[in-house]
Amino acid sequence: MNDGAPCRSRIGRIKMEQEMEAILKELDQQMPSVTFREVKTTTSAKNSKATLLSRKDSYCLGDHLMVRLDMYDHLGKRKEYGGDFLRARVYSSGLKAGASGHVEDYRNGTYLVNFTLFWEGDVKVSILLIHPSEGVSAMWAARKKGYEKIAFTGKFLNGTSDVFTECGFNVTTKAELCEYLVERDQEAFYCVKPKHVPCEAFTYQRSNNKPVSYLTALEKSLFNRSNIGVEIPQMFGAIRVVPCQSNVTTPRGKCTLRMSSPTPSGFMWQSRWHLVSCTMSRLHTLNQINACLKGKLIYFMGDSTLRQWMEYLTMTVRTLKRFDMHGHGKLQNLFAVDTARNIQIQWKKHGHPIITVYDYTVKDHRYVPQDLDMVAGDRDTAVVISLGHHFRPFPMELFLRRMLNVRAAVQRLLLRSPDTKVLIKAENIREMDADPERFSDIHGYTQYLALRVIFQDLRVGFIDSWDMSIAYAVNSIHPAVEVVENQINMFFTYIC
């Protein structure tokens, strides 16, 4: 009998709540807190200015390009506070090259954007105002207000008939509820219990957007598509980058499993991704890919952006044969093997929340920490985890709790199997016309910041899909195949 277990569990919960509170406090400090009474006093991209500092006729490869932003409102008045959500990128379309820029907010309406010049040729600058600070403030406040923006419908089996009922994280009703609780991790989901049907008969689920908003009509007006992602005018044109004798690049070492990465983490050139801190593997042939994967047991755990990896690999490596997992729809789990080379790869969707109008089974529904606890692990086992997009419509506590539980499960896995390779894949930017209150990239960005804090001290690899998708300018939840290929090349770099 282990009398100390409940006490340790309580201590662990208290520590988690304290860590969640600390991360939320840190995010609160980074997010603006401003009010406005009319749209004309909010930040205007068209009235703002981008100025190149220390302009030269040409720049050396490896130089830093510094751009100053001065922000104005729609009345032409200079902004006196920061907090605008900006996206900065340098690119050369003909070279299929791009890289993100680092934005420093001076909190007074002035920003400094730092770009690294990674390639030769004519380079252009793009700086977009995604949301004004007033919109960011409204969105951050609205996100804290509840779970009601998404409605979940559960399907229960009653003999040979289907019964439908309301489900969610915070179901408010006096009716009897079915509670689906992972007590250790304090992860709970509820459904209104159908009459004369046991809770164990829960089979499928789907979701839809509820006509609920926590924004005022004035705040909503900031999120019309024409106001999202507007280019800030530049006082300069393309710049010329040339090789210089003095700028000698230092050799980059082999990539190692670590969460930290510089900003930017890499750059695109000739459509290929190049890491700044280390040298990526380039597996050009099917034989090289097979040699890398031989004997490997690979788990992809998360959302459909990792499902893309699975689909890419099974299309590219024809010897990987997919098995019918007896499910239906796009969210059924995927499993593929190459028996000759002893390769096994599987993708499994993460637990609640899954947001889709299509029915998906909950009969094999588990949270990622539970699935991680079932991985034995060894030197030939690799796990990739990606969570984010489905959490955007809900308060940050839901995402933080899940990722802290994932971290604890990763720590348990590495204790029993230190040679297992674990990688965390960040979410990517998505469509600008997606429903902003539910799915805006500002929600993804706060989750990206939290993700880096939560896993910063673990020996895990990091696939910085956020930075990569900005460099590629792919505004899609499911990026193009060239982006997926480069993400998988990063994965190969870590496991081979």
Image (cartoon, rainbow, N blue to C red):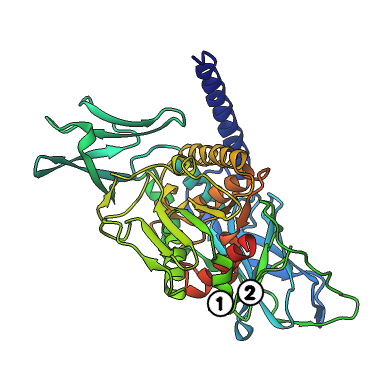
Marker disc for residue 282: 2
Three-letter residue code for mark 1: Asn
The x, y position of residue 222, in whole percent, is 45, 56
Q: CA distance from mark 2 to mark 1?
A: 12 Å
Instruction: Looking at the picture, tell me which residue is in the foreground, 412 or 427.
Output: 412
Vertically, is 474 above or below 411? below
Vertically, is 175 above or below 468? above
Q: Quadrant of residue 95?
A: bottom right
In the drawing, does residue 261 fall left or right of residue 63? left
The x, y position of residue 227, in whole percent, is 47, 63
Residue 224 shows in this picture: yes
Q: Of helix, strand and loop, which one carries label 2?
A: loop
Packing grade of label 2 (10 A; few <14, some 14-19, many >=20) is: some
Residue in the image at 61% along x and 42% along y = 414
Disc on the earlier residue, 2 or 1: 2
Q: According to the image, label 1 marks what residue?
A: 287
Q: How many marks?
A: 2
